[in-house]
Image (cartoon, rainbow, N blue to C red):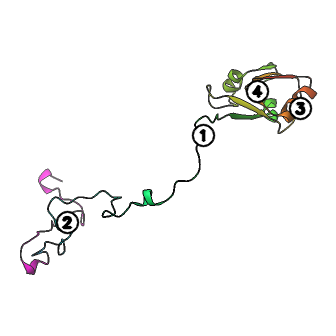
Amino acid sequence: MKLNELKPAEGATHKTKRLGRGRGSGLGKTSGRGHGGQGSRSGSKTRAWFEGGQMPIQRRVPKRGFVNIFRVEYQIVNVGQLERLPESITEITPEILFENGLVGKRKLPVKLLGEGTVGRAFKIQVEKCSGKARELVEAAGGSVESAA
């Protein structure tokens, strides 16, 4: 193989359209732009969502719903997951949950829910806790401190 023998693969290249070169070419007279209208003019470009001056769909369709900008997103931890922690851990904070892989983000607040069972006593500090989770932890001899 030599540099002067290199060619593109079969079917990879196409002949360019030669516009306005007579009727016989198939692209004479109007050069494939049709008869008049916005697209036939030189320099014509329209945005993909432009509807020719008709009221655009994103303005025709009514807006619905409500987005609460003050919404707080909590990371969920169930009491049953606490059994996965090593035996040496008795005090649980969001930092410890993050280090042991029970929550994914260090900054987001943690909420403790009551799915599963608790076999040992924990002293837990979280931002929020459900009533059932608090009952389960306290029944096992532990305590829960929560901000709310």
- Identify residue type, mark 1: Asn
Which of pointers 2 and 3 indicates the residue nearer the eye? 3
* Inter-mark Cα distance, 1 to 3: 32 Å
Q: Which mark is residue 129?
A: none
Pointer 1: what residue? 68
Pointer 4: what residue? 148
The structure residue drawn at horizontal position 74% and vertical position 25%, both measured from the top left corner, is 126
Q: Earlier in the sequence, mark 3 or mark 4?
A: 3
Q: Name the quadrant containing residue 20.
A: bottom left
Compared to 10, does 64 lie above or below?
above
- Identify residue type, mark 4: Ala
Pointer 2: what residue? 14
Q: Are marks 1 and 4 in contact (CB under 8 Å)?
A: no
* Callout 1 secondary element: loop
Q: Which residues are magenta?
A: 1-26
Q: Earlier in the sequence, mark 1 or mark 3?
A: 1
* Inter-mark Cα distance, 1 to 4: 20 Å
Q: Are marks 1 and 2 in contact (CB under 8 Å)?
A: no
